[in-house]
Amino acid sequence: MVSRYKEYFKNEVVPKLIKDTGYKNIHQIPKLSKIIINMGLGEATSNSKIIEQSLSELTKISGQKPVVAKAKKSIAAFKLKENQEIGCFVTLRNERMYDFFDKLINIALPRVRDFKGLSKKSFDGYGNYTFGVKEQVIFPEISYELIEKIKGMNITIVTTAKNNDDGYKLLKGFNFPFRN
């Protein structure tokens, strides 16, 4: 089954980008490459149960099993030991990426309290966009009653765009909720 947003990209976004950017070849058009969801869990140094809960929640949100991030070196000031579990992340590609992107734009972000849109300034210079979410409960898979601690996450949308302007036009083509 082909994702709804993958079809939307082919039928709506590509023709719009060809008109707006002036690209002659369809392969020059920027597209979504991958989406990375990262949960940094500094509290995991004192409570190892947080990692297990976060892995479970991130699996429900993304539909894919996350990878546990470990500390590369010991830092005494942070009570951090080498190879200690300090977070988890998942990289989504293809159908799962488009399904998550659809859910993010149409379901999760509108559920954020006092949401006015995302900043246009969070591009990295190469057309990739990163933003943070303060609560995991904006996703419909997470039940508010079952969570013990509210955790945030960083979401990075990696595109094949060469610059921020092309990345912005691509995300705007998907009706990404940018602030005016």
Image: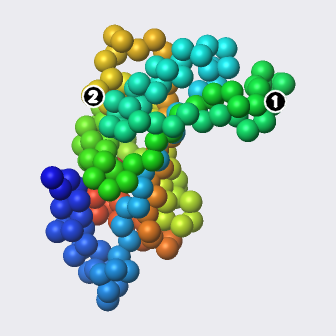
Image quarter where the C terminus lies is bottom left
- Image vertical order of residue 10 relative to residue 141, above or below: below
Residue 176: x and y in percent read 32, 53
Q: Nearer the viewer, residue 179 or 33?
A: 33
Residue 5: x and y in percent read 22, 55
Res. 133 visible in picture:
yes
- Image vertical order of residue 148 relative to residue 130, above or below: above
The residue lying furthest to the right in this view is 76
The residue pinned by badge 2 equals 140
- Image vertical order of residue 153 relative to residue 54, above or below: below
- Of the two numbered discs 1 and 2 in the rendering, the one whose residue sits closer to the viewer: 1
The Cα–Cα distance between marks 1 and 2, rounded to whole angstroms, is: 37 Å
Residue 130: x and y in percent read 50, 50
Q: Quadrant of residue 25?
A: bottom left
Residue 15: x and y in percent read 22, 76
The residue pinned by badge 1 equals 75
Secondary structure at badge 2 equals loop
